Amino acid sequence: MKRFPFVASLAALAGFSSLAGFSASAWAQDRPVDLSEVEVRGVNTVILRVKVSGDMGPGTVVLGDVAGINCGPAQYLYTPHENRQCWVWVQRHRPVTLSARGMKGAFGSDWSIAWSGCKVIDGGARCVIAPDEDVEVGAVFSGTPE
């Protein structure tokens, strides 16, 4: 969740009956009020988080078909020339497909992945989720990393 510092004039918030414990009488004074933080969230977006574990190397990642998911193990978070990110805002109820890469050999015979929090497709090689609220998907790798 991203939080931003915010300063607002109470008069600019006309139409609301309360704000963080301020009474309507304070609004009439048109004084600036410092707010410590404000969460900005679209009504049609949710956060999709991916948590990875298991047998992992620097190239072992979960990728999404939406821009932003490229999730690998924490010790390789700052891999040169590659942005690693394990969360992304997605559109509510819109399917997102996750896949894995970075293991030696063929999926199924040489390595596998155990998904949680999503529907497994393609025999387990990928999974899909259409979240209606903030959600976390788990991915546990088994095999030899590249």
Image (cartoon, rainbow, N blue to C red):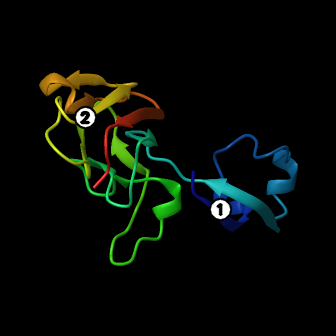
Look at 40% across and 25% down and name the residue there. 117
Where is residue 83 drawn, in percent x and y?
A: 37, 68
Q: In the displayed orientation, state which residue is furthest to the bottom.
A: 81
Q: Secondary structure at mark 2?
A: loop
Q: Quadrant of the C terminus?
A: bottom left
Q: Total of numbered circles in the picture?
A: 2
C-alpha separation, residue under disc 2 versus residue under disc 1: 35 Å
| In this rendering, position of residue 99 left or right of residue 49 | left
The crowd level at tag 2 (other Cα within 10 Å; few <14, some 14-19, many 20+) is: some
Reading the image, the residue beneath label 1 is 12
Q: Secondary structure at mark 1?
A: helix
| In this rendering, position of residue 6 left or right of residue 47 | right
The amino acid sitting under disc 1 is Ala
In the image, residue 115 sits, relative to residue 29, either above or below, namely: above
Nearest the eye: 125 or 7? 125
Where is residue 5 drawn, in percent x and y?
A: 69, 67
Nearest the eye: 78 or 23? 78
Where is residue 137 drawn, in percent x and y?
A: 41, 33
Look at 46% across and 32% down and name the residue there. 135
Reading the image, the residue beneath label 2 is 94
| In this rendering, position of residue 89 left or right of residue 27 | left
In the image, residue 120 sits, relative to residue 104, either above or below, namely: above
Nearest the eye: 57 or 13? 57
The amino acid sitting under disc 2 is Arg
